[in-house]
Amino acid sequence: MTVLAQVGFYEAWWVQILKAIVIFAVGLQLVPVVLLAERKLLGRFQARYGPNRVGPYGALQPLADIVKLLTKEQFRPTTSVGVLFAVAPLISILTAVAAFAIIPFGNVQHIFGERVGLYGVDLSIGPLYLFAFGAVAFYGIMLGGWSSGSKYSFLGAMRGAAQLISYEVSQGLALVGVIISAQTLSLTGIVTAQKGMWYLIPQFFGFLIFLTASFAETNRAPFDLTEADAELVGGYNTEYGGGRFASYYFAEYLNVLVVSGIVTTIFLGGWLLPFGIHPPGWVDPFVVLFKMSLITFLFIWVRATLPRLRYDQLMSFGWKVLLPLATLNALVTAVLVVVTH
Amino acid sequence: MSAAMPGDEQTSAPAAPQSGAPATLPVQSWSPGEDVIEVKRTPAPGAARGTWRTFRETVRGMKTTLGRMVEAPTTVQYPEEKTAVYPRFRGRHKLHRFEDTGLEKCVGCSLCAAACPADCIRVVAAENTAENRVSAGERYAAVYEINLSRCIFCGYCEVACPFDAITMGHDYELSDYDRADLIFTKEMLLAEPLERTPLRNEGD
């Protein structure tokens, strides 16, 4: 009996535990790197240096930020709902970490005589798992904003709720084309299906739609209306400070990494290299990390470029442009797959 | 005077066919001038064209930001690098002596204090005597204090001084930990200031 989902391949329990520790040790270390990269790159995009005071080239800036945030006082407004106020950042961080588990960094490798898949878990329902946790992540923002007991937080949370629900639809539909082509929901299966050609080329519109919807799903500019510093102070995290704010911050950047990983896996051929190059298996994670860094760069680049959308523009873009395009993309792909087979 | 002026045909005639206005409309009665550029409004885009235009403009914007990235940053790394000031920059005040005799130029007339809109200068004058000759005039400033926490660096004191005894220097790094430390006495103002500020020429 399958309780939750079938997995393509699994190892001995101790290998799984070791694997989880390694993946998350590496994955969580990437967050400060992305944080620093974003600040440095944003600086460069705006013809300035970015942080360069703490450590060599400002490399210790994230560390200084984290120390500062974690040593701050834990406070909450008197109007807030205590338990939810404390739990909400945890939901955000938990869903981001859980989604990180399904990103494949390589295929099954032989390490010290054991067969080890270079991923947290290879589910037979990969993208659905992702969307499930994406939907739960919405509670992190929603509950955080609502339980703060502040009107700015509440407005930010309401915007976040509407935005996440609107763009989840397009994000899901954009993947349908790929899933039809690959005829599997397993992420490693989708990667191996891209041996001939990455889905970036046949599914270019799907790629664009998924990327745009992902900007909205991760609350990144130009869709960062939940935070909207100018009119909502900080949106859902206005009332948060110290470690809880750090949790939200951490979750945001981990989400960027997760989306980069998913885009890499689904559209950029995961660990595959072009032109028929087949490096040894240990290179695969580095290929994935390199492609992830390219997508992360794109995220930062877009943030440096585009102004924030107005709320009605956000809604009409999501429902009137992105959703029809995603539907059209799925339909055309379906017809083409049926015709060519 | 009729509605059409001689200059109007030149400015409005080329714009008329583009804006699609019928030729029978009266020509506008005033000329906006030769240097005014008429901005053409693009038609409101439909769904498909609007999406395409958004995409195109997004790519154009991203090209712009990437162009900024390959340029060198314009940041001045302040404590290490300093912005050069112009010769007439009004920084912290300086009091002067005659170079030949070493006597103070200030004669304690208090005109600077009178001219000061922020009321930050305090002068107490005393008589020069034969054995204690401080300034070139009859009197000298026994006390000369400028409260730099009140000074607005307008330079009126400099203008009011009949002997060019007080001028505005170039030092702008004046922060301190205590307000009392910002009251500069005559000795501090007379002392040869540390030239901490790079200077640039008037035209640079």
Image (tube, coloured by chain):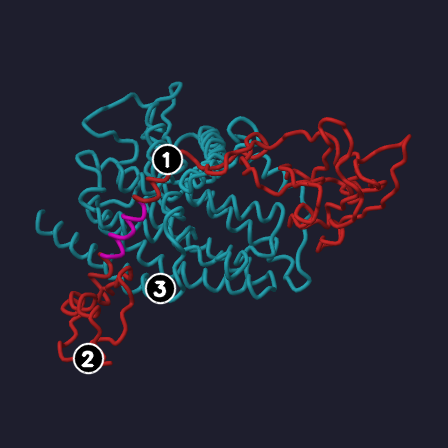
Could you say where residue B202 lies in the image, as x and y percent from the top left?
A: 50, 38
Q: Does B54 lie within the magenta span? A: yes
Q: Identify the subunit bearing mark 1.
A: B
Determine if residue A1 is in view: no
> Which residue, given by chain and number where applicable, does mark 2 sit on?
B26
Q: In the picture shown, does residue B172 fall above or below B20?
A: above
Per the rendered image, the range of residues in magenta is: B53-62
Question: Residue A53 falls in which quadrant of the image?
Answer: top right
> Which residue, given by chain and number where applicable, does mark 3 sit on?
A313
Find out whether the residues at labels 2 and 1 contact each other: C-beta distance under 8 Å: no
Residue count near mark 1 (Cα–Cα under 10 Å), binned few <14, some 14–19, many ≥20: few
- Secondary structure, mark 1, is loop
Q: Say if labels 3 and 1 share a chain.
A: no
Figure chain in red = B
Could you say where residue B63 lies in the image, as x and y percent from the top left?
A: 29, 43
Q: Nearer the viewer, residue A42 or A199?
A: A42
Identity of the residue furthest to the top in this view: A112
Q: Say if labels 2 and 1 share a chain.
A: yes
Nearer the camera: disc 3 or disc 1: 1
Chief SS of the magenta region = helix
Which kind of residue does numbered mark 2 sit on? Pro
Which kind of residue does numbered mark 1 sit on? Glu
Q: Nearer the viewer, residue A287 or B99?
A: B99
Figure chain in cyan = A
> Which residue, given by chain and number where applicable, does mark 1 sit on?
B71
Q: Identify the subunit bearing mark 2.
A: B
Mark toward the start of the polypeptide (2 vs 1): 2
Which kind of residue does numbered mark 3 sit on? Gln
